[in-house]
Amino acid sequence: MNEPTTSGPPKMFFWVSGAALVWNLLGIMAYVGQVTMSPDALNAIPEEQRALYENIPSWVTSAFAIAVNAGAIGCLLLILRKSLALPVLIVSLAAVLVQMFHNFFLSDAVEVMGAAAVVGPAFVILIGIYLVWFANDAKAKGWIS
């Protein structure tokens, strides 16, 4: 088992946490862009993609909001070295999985968007899993408390 350290986390911990915070802030921007998309912008995208956006259930939009906001808060908590980061990042990952379940299984996203509808969301899931692992490892090493 890993022994807690007393010297604090290495610089890499802050680089990873900071990069993850930026990643989640970009996610918040994507969320805001989606929910505030103007009718003109919506009309500018292909009809099949527009139909996807127009038919996103509110529970999926809510999951998106929870995922990116909890992710950003969790990463900020990592930077502040708070162990609350772990459960917050678990909530973020759970919300990502709810959102992606809809994208993969309940919508026509894969048919309409092609490989981008699989590769991008799979990458988001992997980052979520990594952040939960990273926070758990940081907690085990005594870097967050």
Image (spheres, helix red, strand yellow):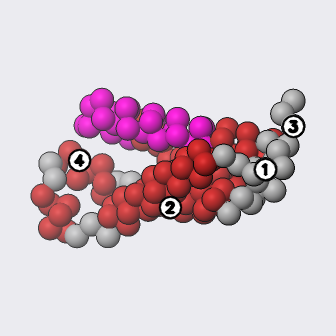
Q: Look at discs 3 and 2 and give the one toward the viewer.
A: 3
Q: Look at discs 1 and 4 and give the one toward the viewer.
A: 1
| Residue 3, disc | 3
From the viewer's perspective, is 40 left or right of 11? left
Label 4 – label 2 distance at C-alpha: 20 Å
Please tell me in which quadrant of the rendered image residue 38 appears.
bottom left
Which residues make up the magenta segment? 105-132
Query: Is residue 37 positioned above or below 74 on the image?
Result: below
**Secondary structure under badge 1?**
loop
**Secondary structure under badge 2?**
helix
Label 3 – label 4 distance at C-alpha: 51 Å
Residue 120 lies in the magenta stretch: yes
Q: Earlier in the sequence, mark 1 or mark 4?
A: 1
From the viewer's perspective, is 95 left or right of 80? left
| Residue 129, percent from left and from top | 60, 38
**Secondary structure under badge 3?**
loop
Query: Is residue 3 positioned above or below 94 on the image?
Result: above
Which residue occupies 16% across, 53% down?
45
From the viewer's perspective, is 86 left or right of 124? right
| Residue 65, disc | 2
| Residue 54, percent from left and from top | 30, 57
**Secondary structure under badge 4?**
helix
Label pair 3/4, CB-CB below 8 angstroms:
no
Which residue occupies 73% across, 39% down?
137
Label pair 3/2, CB-CB below 8 angstroms:
no
**Towards the viewer: 117 or 133:** 133
Label 1 – label 4 distance at C-alpha: 51 Å
Residue 3 lies in the magenta stretch: no
Q: Which residue is mark 4?
A: 49
| Residue 119, percent from left and from top | 37, 32
From the viewer's perspective, is 104 left or right of 82? left
